[in-house]
Amino acid sequence: MNLNKMKTFWLIILLLSVYTIHGQEERKYLMIYTNILQNIDISHPQLNLGMERAIFKRQSISAGLGYYYKNWMYSEPAKGINVNMEYKKLLAEDYYVAIGMNYGKLSYGDTTINKMLYDLYLKIGQRIIMGRFNIDCFVGVGFRYKETRITEKVSDNYKPVDITLLGVRDNEGDFRTAIIKWGFVFGLNLKK
């Protein structure tokens, strides 16, 4: 899939999601949250914050924003953003299934390494509600399309190391791969 088609796909999904949020009358809760595991990820940690809102009975939609700040694995600074959206359906009192998408753009390294990530995933999880606080644990699988570009080399001796399992030092190119999503989310209900 070429880049323009991928961007058009993500834009259509985003616009449909915004329309869904705006067009609903019933709103039972509004929650602000962070995925703690993304904050301490060793390869691409990101400070992240999101909001989740009920749209129908036992259904919600969320949107989040993250900022990449470091690559701890190689002690390198990193910079970039991550945007995600998700639709969630409650199955039982505390359990849910969700489908989501993610877009990330970051750069890091002794050279200028630029990555763009597109994820589409399905996950299951359990939410524990304690008053105004929520704890959410989840696991899921999905598909990732990643573009890696080296735009500036520090020296002619630089050669990227291929560690595709971790996705840290990929060779330059476009990659498609399966992914595993897991996380531990802490949330605060702003409105019930």
Image: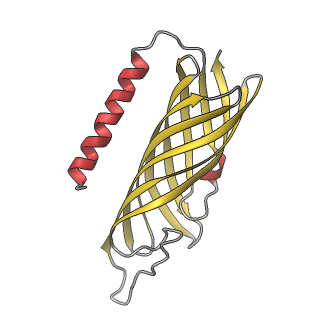
Residue extending farthest to the bottom is: 157
What residue do we see at 66% from left, 23% from top?
189
Q: Is residue 132 left or right of residue 173?
A: right
Where is residue 9 drawn, in percent x and y? Answer: 28, 42
Q: Is residue 170 left or right of residue 123?
A: left
Q: Residue 33 sits in which quadrant? A: top right
State the quadrant of the C terminus.
top right
Q: Which percent across, then down, holds residue 67? A: 49, 49
Q: Which residue is situated farthest in the front direction here?
A: 91
Q: Nearer the viewer, residue 166 or 56?
A: 56
Vertical relation: 65 (above or below) 134: below
Residue 118 in the image: x percent, y percent?
39, 52
Quarter assignment of residue 80: bottom left
- Across and down, in percent, residue 185 comes to 66, 41
Task: Identify the residue at horizontal 51%, vertical 64% (top origin).
Answer: 77
Say if 83 sits above or below 158 in the image: above
Q: Quadrant of residue 112?
A: bottom left
Relative side of 121 to 133, left or right: left
